[in-house]
Amino acid sequence: MLTVNWTEKGGWEAPQIKPFQNLSLHPASSALHYSIELFEGMKAFRGVDNQIRLFRPMLNMERMYRSAERCCLPPSLGVSRTNHALLFVIVGPVGPYFATGAFNPVSLLADPRFVRACRGGVGAYKMGRAEIQLSFLLSSERELVTPPLDGIILPGVTRQSLLDLAREWGEFKVTERTLVMKELLEALKGGRVLEVFGAGTACVVCPVGSLLYKGQHFEIPTMKNGPELATRFYKELTDIQYGRKRRDWAPVIVA
């Protein structure tokens, strides 16, 4: 693991690489009491040529900077400006995000009783809490729809990569707009939905097979339709990540 200490007086100290170990935190640490913390996730890939690649790392760095700026990253039980912070990085091997496998469909629960993010909050920042996977929808009108970055949606690196690819292909309409449950359910009932899938660093692309909403189960025909688009996105991204396809999105790490 790597650790870097920062203090208001001395700034950033020299980074230290050390064996994986527990962190020592003051019991009054603001991270424990007020969640003044952030999280960022990124993968490194050993390619088909045995070289190590990152995937669009500067997008992760820019997002981490915005998150740090938002939460004003000291052991104190009082509400005060942070004067000490610790940046730490841990590394480890990863497998499929879901226990069911790398590309098996998942079921989603949409519960209107709970609100994950609100306008003016921290939904657009990667703080120390769980994040929702963004869902995309390809309708029979050949339109790819995903929620806009309006302050409550996390600006995901994989999300941006899929939008960039779709716009480069130019084969269907790509729209970032608000998609409410009523519209989605009406489209499902009308047979206009072809695929729904999530996207993220951990899962890359994950098809959605069903949805539970207000006690009613809705089947989504993602797998019945291939899933043509989700599979294409998954292959395109992993080909870049593992070096099968050359692109400046995946810089090689040189020792």
Image: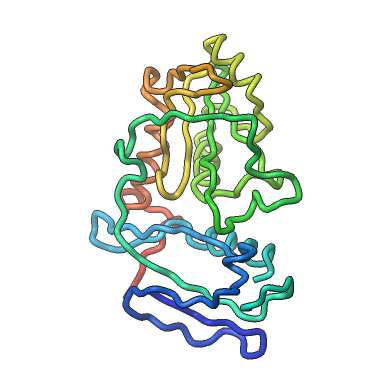
Residue at 54% x, 39% y: name it. Answer: 134
Image x and y of residue 136, in percent? 53, 32
Image x and y of residue 41, in percent? 46, 58
Q: How many marks?
A: 0
| The quarter of the displayed image where residue 20 is located | bottom left
The C terminus: image quadrant: bottom left
Q: Nearer the viewer, residue 7 or 226?
A: 7
Q: Is residue 22 above or below residue 54?
A: below
Instruction: Indicate how the structure is coloured in the image.
Output: rainbow
Residue at 44% x, 58% y: name it. Answer: 42
Q: Which residue ends up furthest to the right in the rendered image?
A: 120
Q: Nearer the viewer, residue 143 or 66?
A: 66
| The quarter of the displayed image where residue 71 is located | bottom right
Residue at 39% x, 68% y: name it. Answer: 90
Image x and y of residue 49, in percent? 24, 58
Q: Which residue ends up furthest to the top in the rendered image?
A: 190
Q: Nearer the viewer, residue 51 or 6?
A: 6
Q: Which residue ends up furthest to the bottom in the rendered image?
A: 10
Image x and y of residue 241, in percent? 36, 52
The N terminus: image quadrant: bottom left
